[in-house]
Image (cartoon, rainbow, N blue to C red):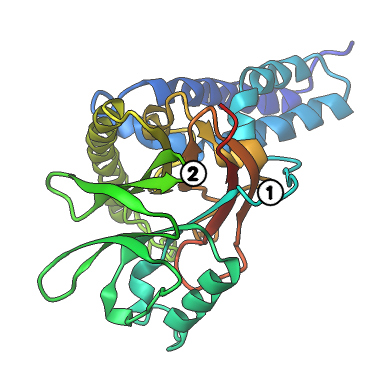
Amino acid sequence: MKKLSWFNKVIFFFNVLVAIGTLLGYVLPFLAPKLFPLLSVFTLILPSLLLLNFFFLLYWAIQVKKQVALSVVILLLGFTFITKFYKITGKEEATEPEDIVLMTYNVRLFNLFKWIPDEFVPQKIKEFVDLQDPDILCLQEYSKSAGLNFKQYPYKYVVSHGDKIKTGQAIYSKHRIIDKGEINLPNSNNNVIFADVLIQADTLRVYSIHLQSVSISPDIHEKLDEEKSKRIFKRIASAFKEQQMQSELIQSHMKDATHRKVICGDMNNSAFSYVYSNIKGELKDAFIEAGSGFGKSYDFPYYPMRIDYVFVDPSIQVKSFKTYSDFKNSDHFPIVTRLALDER
């Protein structure tokens, strides 16, 4: 086998740098952001690093070079990370009368401040909910100002905060809610609510979460200079530290729950983050169980960001999962999943 040309030596040098960065990305989900706040931001680019490793693999494989082994090993080590990022095939199992359909959606105040130039956004969201007809509906960034009436749900739990503009979350259910409550998140406008839903003889605890925002808008590229980049970097690091504290409060609360759990909502962080690992714990990620593609849940133009999730108890079967990325009436996309509760 011939020695590497000077060009290939340069390529392999960058290959090694990407491999090191990827390995670091594999470790970061297990390190608390408050210990390494700036380093934790690195988890956001792990999908890009995985793609670069794949391209390096193809490059060396085409040339039949032994350097291909580096990217092969890196990708094999990160197989579980890859499935969090992309699923080749989904799952759609037969519908049974006992199935529970759950929908979670960050509705962005039903377009209260006209971010989308369309006055009928609230009505479109209402029509979408009516069409999907979920048994349990969880809405983040909920606002009563739209005046929508989800009258098909006899049970609901709505929590709103604020003076002039009240925002919060809502859980609607076709099944009786026998208990409910809120987890207050200190120094934040975000919150977590939960409802114990009685389904036949079973009780399901449903958490709707909305964690600290990192405040990255889709037009981030406009007028982006070095100073602005530093401010954004520090803002993200600070948000990740806040999210860690919030995730620990949620974990502590869940430990006291005796019922089976479903956690859904907007975590404002990637599936490669400490926060994802901490909240998910031993629960199943519904996207990994039955989703397909990238599962993009946030309308960000540069790469597919999955920051909205549904986690379910290990005994609950995920029969289908879909993110409706063509329904653009918020900066998030609605997620609908179908669950079977009878698998204990």
Quadrant of the image containing the C terminus: top right
Q: Left or right? Give the position of 116 relative to 85.
A: left
**Farthest-out residue, bottom:** 119
Closer to the camera, 198 or 116? 198
Task: Identify which residue is drawn at 88% across, 13% down.
Answer: 2
Number of marks in the rendered image:
2
Q: Left or right? Give the position of 281 relative to 187.
A: right
> Could you tell me residue 281's position as x and y percent?
42, 25
* Residue position for label 2: 310
Q: Left or right? Give the position of 234 relative to 302.
A: left
At label 2, the amino acid type is Val
**Disc 1 + disc 2, Cβ < 8 Å:** no
Residue 61: name its quadrant. top right
Q: Earlier in the sequence, mark 1 or mark 2?
A: 1
Is 46 placed above or below 165 here? above
Within 10 Å of the Cα at label 2, are there few (<14), some (14-19), or many (20+) other Cα atoms? many
